[in-house]
Image (cartoon, grey):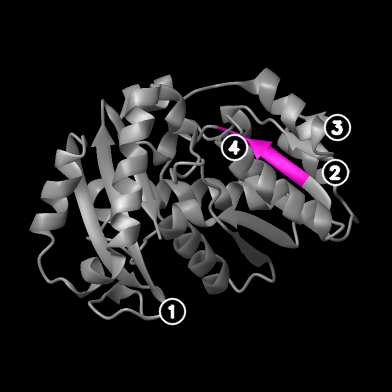
Amino acid sequence: MKIIKTANKITSELLNKKKIGFIPTMGCLHDGHVSLIRKSKKKKLLTIVSIFVNPFQFNNKKDFKKYPKTISSDLKICKKNKVDYVYLPKEKDIYPEKKIIIKNKIHYFKNYMEGKFRPGHFEGVIEVVKRLLSHVKTNYLFLGKKDYQQLIVIRKYIENVDSKIKVIPCDTIRAKNGVALSSRNKFLDQKSLNIAGKVINFLKKNKSQIIKSKNNILFLKKIKELGANKVDYLSAFNLKKLKKTNKPSVNTRVFLAYHLHGVRLIDNF
């Protein structure tokens, strides 16, 4: 496994290489990330993992500063899973300009779900993805469905720039109690994780009613009764039409964002 720390070096290393699989991450790797790595390796691809905590997708500077950084264990996980290259750029490699002006316009979810509650978030995501893809000339981009809204926005961006990169959506990996694995779970104690499990399993059992419901007040009340401090949204969304829906279908997913003891969690199913 090679560790590369500069943009020029990773680009030159991958020059003329074919069949590349790329997994962009913000580190604090867990089994969800490992599943993406394994999918790339199963396709017999040269597998690259990047670790970079992108400041421009955080709405809160405190949230950015406290984001867990576990480089040592991340590298061990990558090595154990036979990653070929780990790209560890510094901020100046991704954003060499003295003044960063983000011009991306994201129309999907603009006033809805994450777009509503985290203004500028998706613009920051696309900015870093655009720059990482200019360094890592990949054929396949592996993204987890746990961040499904982000997955849709990135896939639409790649389609719009007429890129030949193939986006590979990968299933959400969950703990035994149903909670989606997330780097932010590190901030939760066992009691909080148990509450999260109860919330997710309640919603899974009632997803049809949630989708059909035109008013989620009773569901929101139940989530709070189970122990959540606050719910940002609980919404059904048609992935094909890219709009809210009240009709269950193979294209419909339920999206959730809620707060638990100072930690904001998102999920979908």
Dot 1 or dot 2, earlier in sequence = 2
* Front residue of 175 and 245: 175
Q: Residue at x 59, y 29 (%)?
A: 92
Question: Which region is colored magenta?
Answer: 48-52
Left of 66 or right of it: where is 117? left
Disc 1 packing (10 Å; few <14; some 14–19; many ≥20): few
Dot 2 or dot 3, earlier in sequence = 3
Residue 182 shows up from this direction: yes
Q: CA distance from mark 4 to mark 2?
A: 16 Å
Left of 189 or right of it: where is 94? right
For badge 2, the amino acid type reads Ser
Q: Which residue is mark 2?
A: 12
Secondary structure found at label 1: loop
Q: Are marks 1 and 2 in contact (CB under 8 Å)?
A: no
Q: Which residue is mark 1?
A: 250
Q: Residue at x 13, y 61 (%)?
A: 216
Dot 1 or dot 4, earlier in sequence = 4
The image quadrant of residue 208 is bottom left
Q: CA distance from mark 4 to mark 3?
A: 19 Å
Q: Position of residue 224 (x, y in %)?
A: 16, 41
In the rendered structure, does residue 49 fall within the stretch colored magenta? yes
Dot 4 or dot 2, earlier in sequence = 2
Q: Residue at x 84, y 61 (%)?
A: 19
Q: Which residue is mark 3?
A: 2
